[in-house]
């Protein structure tokens, strides 16, 4: 119980203390106003967008080229049938 009584005493002392009152708004406002705004460059974003567009156009060109080579899986089952003699 001595530990809890010690905590009660510390809490009572903390409640009795007066907290200092001071304003920091002027210092914060001065610091915000004194900082220069950073310039934003869009070069990396434009470069990334350009490379993405280039990659997409190459992929589209290859897809159009290879579309003629794509066969249907069903046709793979039907193509061997004319070679089989049923009669």
Image: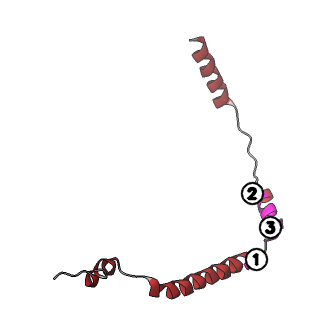
Q: Earlier in the sequence, mark 3 or mark 2?
A: 2
Determine the residue positioned at 61% across, 21% down.
7
Colour basis: secondary structure
Label 3 – label 2 distance at C-alpha: 12 Å
Question: Mark 2 highlights which residue?
Answer: 25
Determine the residue positioned at 59% across, 85% down.
57
Question: Mark 3 highlights which residue?
Answer: 33
Circle 3 or circle 2, nearest the eye: 3
Q: Where does the magenta region start and end?
A: 28-43
Is residue 75 or residue 31 the one in the foreground? 75
Q: Quadrant of residue 84?
A: bottom left
- Does 58 lie within the magenta span? no
Crowd around label 2: few <14 · some 14–19 · many ≥20 (10 Å): few
- Determine whether 3 is above or below 49 in the image: above
Side of 24 where 74 appears, left or right: left
- Determine whether 77 is above or below 34 in the image: below
Residue found farthest to the left: 87
Is residue 68 or residue 19 the one in the foreground? 68
Q: Quadrant of the C terminus?
A: bottom left
Determine the residue positioned at 82% across, 66% down.
35
- Does 35 lie within the magenta span? yes
Question: Mark 1 highlights which residue?
Answer: 41
The x and y percentages for residue 25 are 74, 57
């Amino acid at each position: 119980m001595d530990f809890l009584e010690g905590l009660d005493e510390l809490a009572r002392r903390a409640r009795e203390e007066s907290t200092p009152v001071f304003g920091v708004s002027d210092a914060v406002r001065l610091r915000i106003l004194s900082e220069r705004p950073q310039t934003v460059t869009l070069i990396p974003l434009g470069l990334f967008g350009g490379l993405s567009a280039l990659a997409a156009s190459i992929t589209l060109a290859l897809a159009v080229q290879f579309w003629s080579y794509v066969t249907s899986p069903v046709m793979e089952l039907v193509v061997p049938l004319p070679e089989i003699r049923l009669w």
